């Protein structure tokens, strides 16, 4: 019986022992490849973080965490070389033993650039996946853009999570024919099933990192503007990050602290209940690819307030699923909240729209891209 070919994926967007919700969408997507490939994952981790958590790391034959040595905030154009050397030093013999037929990177810089060199060294077919910020932000630097474009020349296929991202890559000079737009999927059995209400009061929900560029402060400010009109409404943040303290301070100053709740990091298995029973999911990011939490919200029949950035307008139909607003605008957040709260939304219609985004469809398209690369 012929065994499945070996495939190695290199990505920083993957669950970590100390950060189990990180890159959960990648974990779900890559698990589906195991039907056709003997899959192994290499996860580069910043060397200081790797050292800090080294006692929690358990290396296996198919999942390895690699200390990535680099110079923080210095010589960034050389990060791909630093990652290449880090991967070779830590897992070079492991890679040679694996002898992968396919090497895939999930993140454009430095992963895709370093992986393109590794693929040549190992004689493997090379693919990479882009997510959003790796093209929309990192590739704005000419030196990085040049390296990404050069890596694309040796790539047999490039997975883009949105048409908007594909357009950005073409603008960098990447060959359009190599790009496959494949939207992420949703586990509709988890998101969309029957769940118990996790919170007694009505609430607006945010899920993700509490970072400034996720628009979490504008979300609070928009909520504060309508708080007196919606005296029973609460604001719930699911996630961790540096902006928590700033939001807490503003809520204290505005006498809204009792209406703003921080859940911390929520297990992915517990998210469906929080998403399904929210009045709406809010994600006022400055930049995005296609965030899975938006797809998961729609799969639950929950309307979405999101910014019109990246691939979000491609997946959110404002006629039935929510409201799109410009980024970095707390007044637009307030108006969007009012629009959604004033309207009665048809949960089944939202769910029907979300049904097109499934992991099964994603799997078929992903495998098709990989198979086409064999020709």
Image (tube, rainbow, N blue to C red):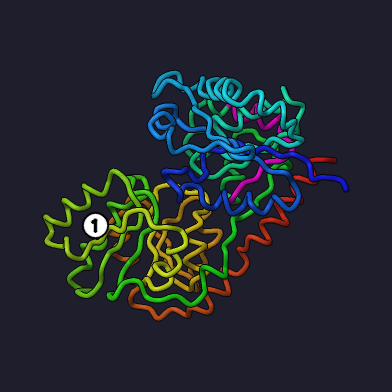
Q: Quadrant of residue 261?
A: bottom left
**Who's the residue at 39% across and 67% down the image?**
274
**Who's the residue at 25% across and 68% down the image?**
234
Q: Is residue 330 left or right of residue 66?
A: left
Residue labelled with disc 1: 221
Q: Is residue 148 magenta?
A: yes
**In the rendered image of this protein, does residue 87 appear above or below residue 2?**
above
Q: Locate the C terminus and report the quarter of the image it occupies.
A: top right
Of residues 93 and 251, the one drawn nearer to the viewer in this rendering: 93
Q: Is residue 325 left or right of residue 113?
A: left
Judge whether residue 281 can be spotted in this image.
Answer: yes
Of residues 295 and 336, the one drawn nearer to the viewer in this rendering: 295
Judge whether residue 171 can be spotted in this image.
Answer: no
**Who's the residue at 48% across and 73% down the image?**
301
Q: Is residue 25 magenta?
A: no
**Who's the residue at 47% across and 62% down the image?**
269
Of residues 16 and 317, the one drawn nearer to the viewer in this rendering: 16
Q: Residues within 10 Å of mark 1 (few under 14, many from 20)?
A: many
Please, what secondary structure does the residue beneath circle 1 have? helix
> Magenta part of the protein: which range?
146-161
Image coords of residue 189 (percent x, y): 57, 70
Image coords of residue 347 (percent x, y): 48, 78
**In the rendered image of this protein, does residue 190 appear above or below residue 120?**
below
């Amino acid at each position: 019986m012929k065994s499945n070919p070996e495939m190695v994926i290199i990505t920083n967007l993957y669950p970590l022992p100390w950060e189990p919700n990180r890159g959960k969408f990648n974990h779900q997507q890559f698990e589906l490849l195991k039907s056709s490939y003997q899959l192994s994952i290499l996860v580069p981790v910043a060397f200081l973080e790797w050292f800090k958590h080294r006692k929690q790391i358990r290396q296996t034959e198919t999942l390895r965490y690699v200390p990535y040595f680099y110079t923080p905030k210095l010589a960034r154009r050389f990060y791909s070389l630093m990652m290449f050397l880090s991967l070779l030093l830590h897992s070079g013999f492991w890679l040679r033993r694996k002898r992968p037929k396919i090497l895939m990177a999930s993140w454009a810089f430095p992963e895709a650039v370093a992986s393109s060199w590794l693929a040549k060294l190992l004689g493997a077919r090379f693919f990479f996946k882009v997510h959003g910020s790796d093209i929309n932000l990192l590739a704005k630097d000419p030196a990085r853009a040049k390296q990404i474009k050069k890596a694309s020349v040796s790539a047999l296929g490039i997975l883009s999570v949105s048409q908007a991202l594909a357009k950005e890559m073409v603008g960098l000079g990447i060959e359009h024919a190599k790009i496959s737009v494949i939207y992420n999927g949703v586990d509709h059995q988890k998101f969309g099933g029957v769940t118990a209400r996790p919170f007694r009061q009505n609430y607006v929900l945010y899920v993700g990192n509490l970072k400034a560029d996720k628009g979490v402060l504008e979300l609070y400010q928009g909520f504060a503007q309508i708080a007196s009109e919606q005296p029973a409404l609460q604001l719930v943040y699911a996630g961790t990050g540096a902006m928590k303290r700033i939001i807490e301070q503003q809520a204290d100053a505005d006498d809204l602290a009792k209406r703003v709740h921080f859940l911390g990091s929520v297990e992915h298995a517990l998210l469906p209940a929080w998403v399904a029973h929210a009045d709406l999911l809010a994600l006022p990011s400055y930049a995005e690819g296609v965030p899975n939490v938006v797809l998961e919200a729609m799969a639950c029949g929950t309307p979405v307030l999101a910014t019109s950035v990246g691939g979000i307008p491609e997946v959110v139909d404002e006629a039935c699923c929510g409201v799109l607003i410009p980024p970095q605008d707390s007044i637009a957040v307030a108006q969007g909240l009012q629009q959604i709260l004033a309207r009665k939304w048809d949960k089944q219609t939202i769910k029907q729209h979300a049904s097109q985004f499934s992991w099964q469809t994603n799997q078929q398209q992903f495998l098709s891209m990989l198979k086409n690369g064999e020709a």
